[in-house]
Image: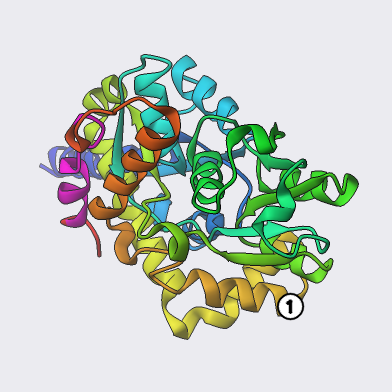
């Protein structure tokens, strides 16, 4: 009788221990997600999500890779090296229309924090004539914004040269090293760094062009279909990270993290955080997709590239976002 009791006890213990070990193994093996983006202050929620455990709580191990250009992001996504790209969503449109890749935008993110910065010798837009405008690529996103703004100011495309150098850090570097690079659209923190170096802003792009859906998350449609649960967990974790980031109770810690990751002086980190917190200029609450802003993205592309894109629904599927919001805590 005692023997049977001991055997039963040991079997029960084995079951419990097995469950514990299985649970531990599952917790120790989160799904690895490779996220490509450009180095920019709006990477802050990703740092928060990693350091505060939001991604881990959703079973994810997020690995961020900063790229030199949007072209590197597109190549990485198409090749499968990147699972998700967080970048200007016009790049997703370009992947569909130019590269003929079946890419889908799954969430919003922000309005870009973009300003049209110029060298201190530029008094108005007409002074850009005969000089270069520094861009990421010549046919996507903020380069198209620059072309439309310059057209509004009476400049034709042969009045200036587009100089494609890559991300915001590289665009600022190019302006510092060569004064013939008269202008660029810069976002945070590079816009504030440009101002500290004596350059000046001719205005916010959203003031000149209207609402604009800038950065958001996009991926291959085939990957989204095959990894729907993972994608939804990612969106939920990002929204939680963004909520923590924008909560004023966490401001001091968020500013400190921003200063540390981007090696920024405290005053620039604080001003960067303040500007990113403006929903009309920086982060969209809960990374909500701005459909009006996206229609403007398509309109800018149509006007500057001379090719009419498809309806917004061709590029966007917010069903993943809608399901993800039910997972947000």
Q: Is residue 309 above or below residue 242?
A: above
The total number of labels drawn is 1
Q: Mark 1: which secondary structure?
A: helix
Q: How is the image coloured?
A: rainbow
Residue 216 position, x and y percent, is 39, 46
Residue 321 lies in the magenta stretch: yes
For disc 1, the neighbor class at 10 Å (few under 14, some 14 to 19, many from 20) is some
Left or right position of 240 against 119: left
Q: Residue at x 60, y 31 (%)?
A: 137
Q: Nearer the viewer, residue 58 or 221?
A: 221
Magenta stretch, main secondary structure, is helix
In the rendered image, the residue lying farthest to the left is 1
In the rendered image, the residue lying farthest to the bottom is 249
Q: Residue at x 71, y 34 (%)?
A: 163
- In what quadrant of the picture does the N terminus appear? top left
Residue 307, quarter of the rendered image = top left
Q: Which residue is mark 1?
A: 266
- In what quadrant of the picture does the C terminus appear? bottom left
Q: Is residue 87 above or below residue 138?
A: below
Residue 113 position, x and y percent, is 52, 61
Q: Nearer the viewer, residue 19 or 45?
A: 45
Residues in magenta?
314-325
In the rendered image, the residue lying farthest to the right is 177
Residue 82 position, x and y percent, is 48, 27
């Amino acid at each position: 009788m005692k023997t049977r009791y001991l055997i039963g006890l040991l079997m029960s213990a084995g079951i419990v221990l097995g469950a514990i070990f299985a649970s531990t193994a599952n917790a120790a093996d989160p799904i690895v997600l490779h996220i490509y983006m450009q180095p920019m202050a709006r990477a802050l929620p990703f740092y928060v999500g990693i350091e505060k455990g939001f991604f881990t709580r959703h079973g994810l191990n997020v690995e961020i890779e900063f790229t030199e250009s949007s072209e590197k992001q597109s190549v990485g996504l198409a090749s499968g090296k990147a699972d998700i790209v967080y970048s200007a969503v016009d790049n997703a449109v370009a992947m569909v229309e130019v590269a003929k890749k079946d890419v889908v935008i799954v969430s919003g993110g922000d309005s870009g924090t973009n300003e049209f910065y110029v060298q201190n010798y530029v008094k108005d837009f007409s002074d850009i004539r005969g000089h270069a405008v520094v861009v990421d690529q010549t046919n996507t996103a903020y380069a198209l914004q620059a072309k439309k703004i310059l057209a509004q100011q009476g400049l034709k495309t042969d009045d200036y040269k587009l100089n494609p150098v890559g991300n915001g850090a590289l665009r600022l570097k190019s302006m510092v090293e060569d004064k013939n690079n008269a202008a660029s659209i810069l976002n945070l923190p590079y816009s504030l760094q440009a101002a500290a170096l004596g350059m000046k802003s001719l205005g916010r792009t959203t003031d000149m062009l209207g609402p604009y859906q800038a950065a958001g998350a996009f991926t291959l449609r085939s990957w989204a279909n095959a990894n729907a649960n993972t994608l939804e967990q990612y969106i939920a974790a990002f929204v939680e990270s963004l909520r923590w980031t924008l909560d004023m109770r966490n401001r001091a810690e968020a500013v400190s993290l921003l200063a540390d990751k981007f090696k920024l002086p405290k005053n620039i980190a604080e001003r960067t955080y303040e500007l990113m917190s403006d929903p009309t200029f920086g982060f969209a609450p809960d990374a909500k997709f701005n459909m009006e802003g996206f229609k403007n993205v398509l309109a800018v592309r149509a006007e500057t590239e001379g090719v009419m894109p498809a309806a917004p629904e061709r590029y966007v599927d917010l069903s993943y976002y809608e399901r993800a919001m039910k997972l947000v805590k």
